[in-house]
Image (spheres, rainbow, N blue to C red):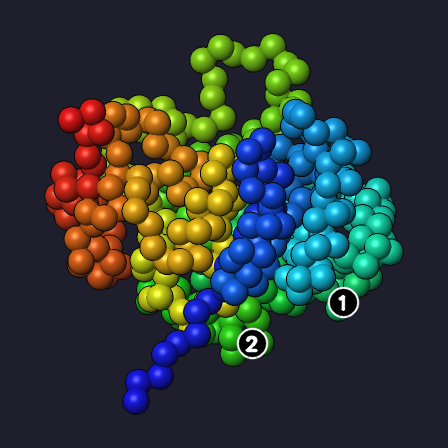
Amino acid sequence: MKQTKAKTPLSVGYTVPADGQIPFVDLISRYRDAIGEVYFAFPGISSGRSPFGQESPYNDYDALNILTEDLVALTQMGVDRNLLFNASCGGADCMSLQHEREVLSILDFLFERGIGPTGITTTSPVTAEIIKRNAPEIQVRASVNMRIDSIKGVQYVEHLFDSFCICRDINRDLDALGRLTEYLHKQGKTCSILVNSGCLRKCSMQSFHDNAVSHELEIRSKANLSWARPAGCREFFSTPLHHVDFLQNTWIRPEDLHHYDGMVDLFKIATRMHFLPAVVIDAYANRSYHGNLADLFEPGHGPLFAPFVVDNDRFPEDWFEKTTSCNKDCRRCGYCRSVKEKVFVNSEM
């Protein structure tokens, strides 16, 4: 009898829901069987996004109270909690005593309340070593923003990290991904992949964008160039000729997750900044989605394709096989262009 692979659990980004949306803890409880971990930022701390707690309507104090209550519930539920020190730039404090004091004080705050993290994700080798020196019981994960896509990339830092979130650019290169995950498992490491990134594959603007987003609040306080934008992908997709590039990115449809079961240990889904986190979690927990596929990703580029939507039900049966076995030379291949004609549907007709 053929043995069925166990389903790889989800790692879900913590968010405070908008008015009228289901409370986050209730959402996790609803899909508890599919969720293994929640990752979260600490209020006021840079984490690769605008610091949680500094967005309206929450200040740091309100955000901390909400987060603390939710972490208590998640801890009681038995969900792993992964704390983000994920900023792409630590500035002048990246190696400072102040940075170490800040990291350790946050850990003290959480552990004193019985809600200490089971893991930490960081882009910084210094932050990773701070954890290794002071709290070795905590699993330390290399951030997807480190763009580690090879065994060689792992070997430089494997003494600092217990887990790796692999560069999304090889999500559809099963040979490269398989070699890397096999190596990690042999070294006793775990690995995850980000499955719903809306970012461009091999994006040459990622470093700039990551830094701009991390400093979003400071940027708002400046007199900025009227034409300047942090995300060049929005301008890129504003040209219909480039819409086909959406299909050539790194995201994985919910229906295709089973191909990665047994290869990776966690499926990370971006929900921290998503406008409909419940929809994303439902789709990836149930591994099925009927709707505009662009609405599942973060950043979401769906409005840029209007009046067209990307109908997830129209993808051909050979989609996964074709897009994970091709040589990624999109100049010489017309497959994605042919799929675009099927899945991009005019919603006004």
12 vs 186, nearest the viewer: 12
Q: Quadrant of the C terminus?
A: top left
Secondary structure under the numbered disc 1 in the rendered image: loop
Q: Which residue is mark 2?
A: 187
Q: Nearer the viewer, mark 2 or mark 1?
A: 1
42 lies above or below 188 = above
The picture places residue 329, in percent across and down from the top left corner, at 22, 49
The answer to whether residue 270 is seen in the rendering is: yes
Question: Three-letter amino acid code at disc 2?
Answer: Gln
Q: Residue visible at 44% across and 36% down? A: 299
Residue 138 coordinates in the image, percent (x, y) = 72, 64
- Foreground residue, 152 or 127? 127
Q: Residue 331: image x %, image y %?
A: 18, 42
* Rendered view: 153 above or below 306: below
Which quadrant of the figure has residue 256? bottom left
Please tell me whether mark 2 sits on a helix, a strand or a loop: loop
Q: Quadrant of residue 279?
A: top left
- Report x, y in % for residue 219: 62, 21
Relative placement, left or right, of 83 versus 284 is right
Horizontal side, residue 260 vs residue 31: left or right: left
- Whether residues under marks 2 and 1 lie with C-beta atoms below 8 angstroms apart, the answer is no
Q: Please state, as top left, top right, bottom left or bottom right, where the N terminus lies in the image.
A: bottom left
Name the amino acid, label 1.
Pro
Residue at image point 49% right, 45% down = 278
Side of 185 where 131 appears, left or right: right
Q: How many marks?
A: 2
Q: Residue at x 73, y 36 (%)?
A: 63
Looking at the image, tell me whether mark 2 or mark 1 is earlier in sequence order: 1
Residue at left offset 52%, top offset 78%:
186
Residue 170 in view (yes/no):
no
Circle 2: is it few (<14), some (14-19), or many (20+) Cα within 10 Å?
A: few
Residue to which mark 1 is pinned: 136
